[in-house]
Image (cartoon, rainbow, N blue to C red):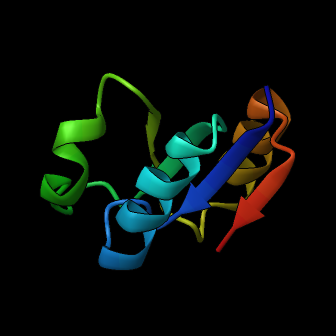
Amino acid sequence: MKKALITGIAGFAGSHLAEHLLTQNIGVSGLYHPGHSIANIEHLKDKINLEACDILDKKKVKSLISRIDPDYVFH
């Protein structure tokens, strides 16, 4: 199975992209800013991997990319 990483997955575009990728049988992981609402993706929590991460934290972002090993990255 192909894997995708979406930054800003909890936003409008990110949440809709996650829904679409799931229909294409693509595994979805997503980064969301800690402290921000995840209401847009609440219904997907059992189908995706969520990671609270500030995109400005380069060390954590690099670590997550290495661990997730995505085929696609959407920013």
Please tell me which residue is depicted at 63% across the width and 44% down the height of the picture: 24
- Across and down, in percent, residue 40 comes to 19, 59
In the rendered image, the quadrant that contains the C terminus is bottom right
Residue 47 higher or lower than 16, as above or below: above
Question: Camera-side residue: 46 or 26?
Answer: 26
Left or right? Give the position of 38 relative to 18: left
Question: Camera-side residue: 17 or 23?
Answer: 23
In the rendered image, the quadrant that contains the N terminus is top right
Quarter location, residue 64? top right
- Across and down, in percent, residue 53 comes to 48, 52
Question: Camera-side residue: 55 or 2?
Answer: 2
Residue 7 higher or lower than 29, as above or below: below
- The total number of labels drawn is 0
Please tell me which residue is depicted at 52% across the width and 41% down the height of the picture: 22
Please tell me which residue is depicted at 12% across the width and 55% down the height of the picture: 39
- Across and down, in percent, residue 20 comes to 49, 56
Left or right? Give the position of 27 relative to 72: left
Residue 42 higher or lower than 39, as above or below: above
Left or right? Give the position of 16 relative to 39: right
- Across and down, in percent, residue 6 comes to 58, 58
Question: Can you name the residue that lies furthest to the front here?
Answer: 23
Please tell me which residue is depicted at 87% across the width and 46% down the height of the picture: 71
